[in-house]
Image (spheres, coloured by chain):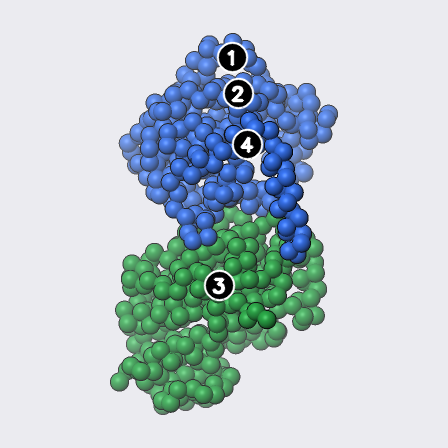
């Protein structure tokens, strides 16, 4: 980039910054001070071992924080239960697009004490997407391989996992608040690294974009992970996948520490996974009872 | 006095290593290229590893230790030629080491052999599969050399063989792919990608080889330097200008230019500008206590072109 274009861009950036309403600037200041309190090991160029950059994170967090405060009006309940040090957040996954992951990460940064970066374990195709891959890495996401997860946990990080994967994200509206089959990998990693698990029940995301059908076969033919049909998608094009302004309530359960051998049979691992699932379901029950309505407090 | 033979002695790292070792050991080396101005006492034999005359060198020199880094790394010559020089040359060298009772062997491979893939984890260890040739057939020979040497460790327990897989070497004299790439006036990158890249200073790599010899290491070791940085950060720190090009366009143009011999980087190399190959150097550090001395900033500064 030429120096002229560079300075022009900076000027535009500054101007846009100055034109921001006061409450947006206040939110940005709040994000900045919270990000500054996250203990991360940075090298001389301001990046951690996995490519996270606090400076990038501050900028990336603004849209996420705006959604958190003003669109989904998220309430993080019992977030103080998340222990310090290594921890696995195991949550339900829904809503066609991973806003639940964004909001959980925002909760950990904006509400947890001290603020934390919740590491997302991304599908590997995320790293194949231009721009998205960089944004993901700079905000702390890693390719979801067991090795990455173990090295993160050993470094005392907070890792969030959605064991339902796409099965959950693209579940149908009639299956809301019904957990889909859980992957077992997270439990083996928790046993291997002796990591406490915090079951997280996200109430709200399951109604944000009601799935009427999922054309799995067509999706696979097109090389996509899923092809949901919702009241607005594909009718309105990509915009149709945006979520409804549902009210999010995120319930953090008591930390669970499991004992055992990470190479146990699936059946034994599954028993432990069922304990986590039951805890998440208990959170759903509490949340559905406590909330006034899908869109209201 | 102990005698060390270095293959590829006229290359930048070979010269540095020879100079470093010359004060305490008897150093000789082979290379197809000449090294004018070599230290007094360093004997440079201009032979090809594949030729009969190389055996004559081994017979007359009878080295105690061999450091093998005589590879053809440039892509200007044909793939067949490179494969023959690198793979058959290595095989010849390994055979000669057995025949002439070499006690220690260090093969300098590269961490590029793991391959650049979207699903690569961070902290790749030495047991990770060598998949580079899946998308980068042009360095198949490097993968084969590494595999040959790796098998040799177990086939010949009487020889302490170490295979080093260093990350990208940078320095005022280094001619690694990455250092020549970063020296370009305008550095083409893949738009929307910014992988973390690990670097080691050439001096630190030389230190690592010396330590490997001193500790009589056996086995395979990743070797990392003092740090890593996202590609665009590295380019900016070198003082160059990044030129982001959309991936498909980059591949198309890159392939054409490479086939015409204008551009020295084969199409398979583009993935290294997209995806990270981040290795863990823990095993080597535990075995030798290697501490890199040159900081990342100094490494980048050493590549900087003199400003007008």
Residue underneath mark 4: A25
**B279 to B259, vertically: above or below:** above
Same chain for mark 4 and mark 2? The answer is yes
Colour that chain B carries in the picture: green
Q: Is residue B182 visible?
A: yes
Is the residue under label 1 in contact with that under label 2 (CB below 8 Å)?
Answer: yes
For the C terminus of chain B, the quadrant is: bottom right
Task: Name the residue tied to disc 1.
Answer: A297
Q: Which residue corresponds to mark 2?
A: A73
Q: Residue B302: where, in percent of width, then height?
A: 48, 68
Residue B300 disc label: 3
Residue at image coords 58%, 42%: A132
Helix or strand or loop: what does disc 3 sit on? helix
Q: Quadrant of residue A88?
A: top left
Mark 3 or 4: the one toward you: 4
The colour applied to the residues of chain A in this rendering is blue
Q: Secondary structure at mark 2?
A: loop
Q: Are marks 3 and 4 on the same chain?
A: no
């Amino acid at each position: 980039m030429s120096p002229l274009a560079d300075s022009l861009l900076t000027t535009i950036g500054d101007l846009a910054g100055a034109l921001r309403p006061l409450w947006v600037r206040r939110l940005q200041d709040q994000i900045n001070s919270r990000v500054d309190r996250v203990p991360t090991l940075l090298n001389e160029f301001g990046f951690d071992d996995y490519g996270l950059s606090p400076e990038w994170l501050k900028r990336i967090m603004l849209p996420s924080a705006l959604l958190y405060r003003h669109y989904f009006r998220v309430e993080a309940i019992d977030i103080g239960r998340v222990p310090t040090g290594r921890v696995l957040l195991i949550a339900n996954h829904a809503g066609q697009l991973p806003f639940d992951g964004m909001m959980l990460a925002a909760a950990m940064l904006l509400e947890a004490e001290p603020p934390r970066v919740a590491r997302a374990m991304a599908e590997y195709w995320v790293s194949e997407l231009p721009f998205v891959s960089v944004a993901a890495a700079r905000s702390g996401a890693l390719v979801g391989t067991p090795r990455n997860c173990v090295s993160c946990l050993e470094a005392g990080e907070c890792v969030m996992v959605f064991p339902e994967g796409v099965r959950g994200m693209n579940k149908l509206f009639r299956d809301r608040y019904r957990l889909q089959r859980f992957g077992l990998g997270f439990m083996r990693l928790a046993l291997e690294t002796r990591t406490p698990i915090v079951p997280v029940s996200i109430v709200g995301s399951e109604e944000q974009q009601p799935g009427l059908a999922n054309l799995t076969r067509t999706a696979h033919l097109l090389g996509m992970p899923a092809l949901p049909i919702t009241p607005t998608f594909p009718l309105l094009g990509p915009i149709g996948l945006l979520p409804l302004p549902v009210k999010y309530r995120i319930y953090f359960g008591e930390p669970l520490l499991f004992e055992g051998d990470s190479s146990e049979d699936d059946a034994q691992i599954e028993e432990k996974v069922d304990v986590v699932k039951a805890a998440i379901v208990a959170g759903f029950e509490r949340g559905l009872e406590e909330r006034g309505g899908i869109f209201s407090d | 006095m102990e005698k060390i033979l270095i293959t590829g002695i006229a290359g930048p790292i070979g010269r540095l290593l020879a100079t470093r070792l010359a004060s305490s050991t008897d150093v000789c080396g082979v290379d197809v290229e000449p090294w004018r101005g070599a230290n007094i006492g360093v004997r440079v034999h201009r032979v090809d590893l594949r030729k009969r005359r190389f055996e004559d060198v081994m017979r007359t020199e009878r080295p105690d230790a061999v450091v093998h880094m005589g590879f053809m790394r440039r892509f200007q010559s044909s793939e067949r030629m490179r494969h023959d020089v690198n793979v058959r040359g290595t095989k010849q060298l390994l055979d000669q080491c057995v025949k002439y009772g070499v006690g220690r062997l260090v093969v300098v491979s590269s961490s590029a052999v793991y391959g650049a893939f979207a699903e690569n984890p961070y902290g790749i260890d030495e047991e990770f599969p060598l998949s580079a040739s899946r998308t980068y057939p042009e360095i198949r020979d490097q993968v084969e050399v590494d595999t040959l040497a790796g098998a040799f460790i177990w086939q010949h327990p009487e020889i302490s063989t170490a295979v080093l897989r260093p990350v990208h070497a940078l320095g005022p004299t280094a001619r690694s792919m990455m250092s020549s790439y970063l020296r370009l006036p305008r550095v083409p990158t893949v738009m929307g990608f910014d992988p973390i890249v690990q670097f080691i200073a050439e001096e630190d790599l030389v230190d690592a080889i010396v330590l490997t010899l001193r500790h009589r290491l056996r086995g395979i070791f990743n070797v990392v330097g003092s740090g890593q940085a996202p590609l665009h950060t590295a380019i900016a720190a070198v003082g160059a200008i990044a030129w982001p090009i959309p991936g498909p366009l980059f591949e198309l143009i890159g392939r054409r230019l490479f086939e015409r011999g204008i551009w020295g980087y084969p199409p398979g190399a583009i993935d290294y500008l997209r995806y990270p190959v981040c290795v863990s150097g823990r095993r080597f550090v535990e075995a030798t206590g290697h501490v890199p001395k040159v900081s990342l900033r100094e490494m980048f500064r050493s590549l900087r072109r003199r400003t007008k």
